Image (cartoon, rainbow, N blue to C red):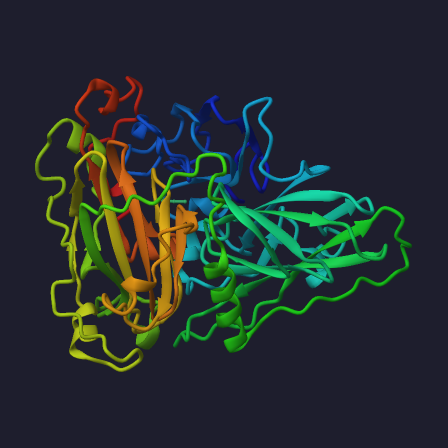
């Protein structure tokens, strides 16, 4: 048994236009606490609708209902919705497609058809048991709910896209996998990327793409090859040089079928990048994309920075409590941190309500702008005292408060010792500019000069390269409590999470509204929420 929305996997596609108000009634007939997060939606002045469990709201409890209602403004493209409580997003997710207002064109030639492609992970087990397995391991991957011919039991259930010679299709691609970055490739065809995370890009031609969990790509595919059948393929990108043995995963295939293809023709194969080639392919794809300057919603990079942060991301180990079974290497527990803090999710009231009603004792306003010790992670892969300290982070619910409309720049430095892998950092409520990506230590003199302030890509989720860094900038123009966290679902309980509180602006127009009267209440029993 798996929990689903309206009985389907993936869940229903939501189609809206920019400028619409989206209203979704959630009726919780499951036995779980639920929230639904609208991943990548700005939620301008509607932070109560963000759906982050115990951050923006208490969960919708079994046999309870809640209605999400918010405006979708200032963004177009492909996003996703998903549950935001423990690992329920494994099966509770779907596409959220935002088209231009009627009469407004795309900034690229109108496609003949649009095709959502939702990539997922599948486990032959109960969702509750997932936490007892190492994160990257699943039994299969799915394209729009189908595992295809990689397994005997699903060989007749393969996703097929029928195409007409010469026509162009807009693929709306979503990586809804819990814990794996995925490569995607179509045999013998190039695609043209036109948007990432619902932000238009300079058209970028590629034969392969990579998406971190939570990322989306819109790409044009033209049926310009000799008539026939061609595989499309997804395969996991495991940048982790992990001590956890990860069994080789089987790539999952779908088919592009030209309308007059002979049914006997054998499909042409594609070849996925692997090993070091995978790291360089991933880096090339991720770092080459630029924003469509002058396109819809483009705003130039703010050049004045009000708040500078340097955030180190750690994934290490902590001792396993006696008498329990832990899944980390050497039988220990994983511990994650940002600036040496392991985020503890509040247990009795949502963080946003505690902020709004001024309830003390729920969180502290002291998230550090810098890591607490001198950053001497000089040699990637070499164990230093600094790394050792990262293995014993402080457990705390601490937030970083931002003034309304301030511009924030964050250098995120990946320092994972146990598993130097790419971590997809996701910011709720905002898109950020990605000014630069690199490997090794961020050097404020050498690297700051090379940042792209002209046409940087924008994202809500960015993969911080293994043993590397990214520089992000965003404008805090939306009051409320917003999570910034690793979008590998398994890393949420490890605490690779922080929360920004953006204060009210000068007018009622720029201030938080009171919560809706039916916002779910927490009960007095904190044990029913995630820890
Ligand atoms: Cu898509 Cu906080 O997540």
Measuring from the top left, give residue 83's x and y in whole percent: 42, 40
In the displayed structure, 201 sits above or below 104; it is: below
Residue 195 is at least partly visible in this image: yes
The percent coordinates of residue 159 (x first, y second) are: 71, 49
* Residue located at (30% from left, 30% from top): 47
Task: Say how many tags the image has.
Answer: 0
Q: Who's the residue at 74% across and 47% down the image?
A: 161
Image location (x, y in percent) of residue 439: 36, 71
Q: Quadrant of residue 139?
A: bottom right
Q: Is residue 488 visible?
A: no
Of residues 529 and 487, the one drawn nearer to the viewer in this rendering: 487
Q: In which quarter of the image is the N terminus?
A: top right
Q: Is residue 465 depicted above or below 214 in this figure?
A: below
Tell me if 160 is positioned left or right of 83 in this view.
right
Q: Is residue 140 left or right of 359 when viewed as pictured?
A: right
Say which residue appears at 42% left-offset and 50% top-offset. 455
- Image coords of residue 466 (percent x, y): 38, 69
Q: Is residue 69 left or right of residue 492?
A: right
Query: Compared with residue 440, is residue 480 higher up or lower down, i.e. above or below?
Result: above
Identity of the residue furthest to the bottom in this view:
382
Ligand 1 lies in which image quarter? Answer: top left
Which residue is found at the position 16% from the left and 71% from the top?
A: 389
């Amino acid at each position: 048994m798996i929990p689903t929305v309206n009985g389907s996997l993936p869940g229903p596609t939501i189609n809206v236009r920019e400028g619409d108000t989206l209203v979704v009634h959630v009726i919780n007939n499951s036995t779980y606490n639920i929230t639904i997060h609208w991943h990548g939606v700005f939620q301008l002045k509607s932070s109560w609708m963000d759906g982050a469990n115990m951050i923006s709201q208490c969960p919708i409890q079994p046999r309870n209902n809640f209605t999400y209602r918010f405006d979708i403004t200032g963004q177009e493209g492909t996003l996703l919705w998903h549950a935001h409580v423990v690992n329920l997003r494994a099966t509770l997710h779907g596409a959220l497609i935002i088209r231009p207002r009627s009469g407004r064109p795309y900034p690229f030639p109108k496609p003949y058809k649009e095709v959502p492609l939702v990539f997922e992970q599948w486990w032959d087990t109960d969702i509750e048991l997932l936490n007892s397995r190492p994160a990257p391991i699943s039994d299969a991957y799915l394209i729009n709910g189908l595992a295809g011919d990689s397994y005997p039991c699903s060989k007749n259930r393969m996703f097929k896209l029928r195409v007409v010679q010469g026509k162009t299709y807009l693929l709306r691609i979503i990586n809804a996998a819990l814990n794996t970055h995925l490569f995607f490739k179509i045999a013998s065809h190039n695609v043209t990327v036109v948007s990432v995370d619902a932000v238009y890009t300079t058209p970028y031609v590629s034969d392969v793409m990579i998406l971190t969990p939570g990322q989306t790509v819109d790409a044009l595919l033209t049926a310009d090859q000799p008539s026939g059948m061609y595989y499309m393929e997804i395969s996991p990108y495991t940048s982790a040089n992990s001590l956890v043995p990860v069994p080789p995963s089987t790539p999952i295939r779908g088919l592009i079928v030209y309308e007059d293809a002979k049914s006997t023709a054998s499909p042409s194969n594609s070849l996925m990048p692997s090993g070091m080639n995978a790291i360089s392919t991933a880096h090339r794809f991720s770092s080459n994309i630029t924003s469509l300057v002058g396109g819809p919603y483009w705003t130039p990079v703010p050049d004045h920075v009000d708040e500078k942060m340097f955030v180190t991301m750690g994934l290490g180990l902590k001792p396993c409590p006696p008498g329990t079974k832990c899944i980390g290497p050497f039988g220990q527990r994983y511990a994650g941190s940002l600036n040496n803090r392991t985020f503890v999710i509040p247990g009795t009231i949502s963080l946003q309500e505690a902020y709004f009603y001024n309830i003390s004792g729920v969180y502290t306003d002291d998230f550090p702008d810098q890591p607490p010790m001198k950053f001497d992670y000089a040699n990637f892969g070499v164990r230093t005292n600094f790394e050792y300290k990262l293995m014993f982070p402080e457990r705390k619910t601490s937030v970083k408060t931002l003034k309304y409309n301030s511009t924030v720049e964050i250098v995120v430095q990946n320092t994972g010792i146990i598993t130097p892998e790419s971590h997809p950092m996701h910011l709720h409520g905002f898109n950020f500019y990605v000014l630069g990506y690199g490997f090794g230590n961020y050097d404020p003199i050498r690297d700051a000069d090379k940042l792209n302030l002209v046409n940087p890509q924008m994202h809500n989720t960015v993969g911080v390269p293994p043993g590397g860094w990214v520089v992000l900038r965003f404008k805090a123009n939306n009051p409320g409590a917003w999570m910034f966290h690793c979008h590998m679902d398994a890393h949420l309980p490890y605490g690779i999470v922080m929360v920004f509180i953006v204060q009210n602006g000068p007018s009622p127009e720029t201030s938080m509204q009171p919560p809706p009267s039916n916002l779910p209440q927490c009960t007095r029993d904190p044990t029913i929420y995630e820890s």
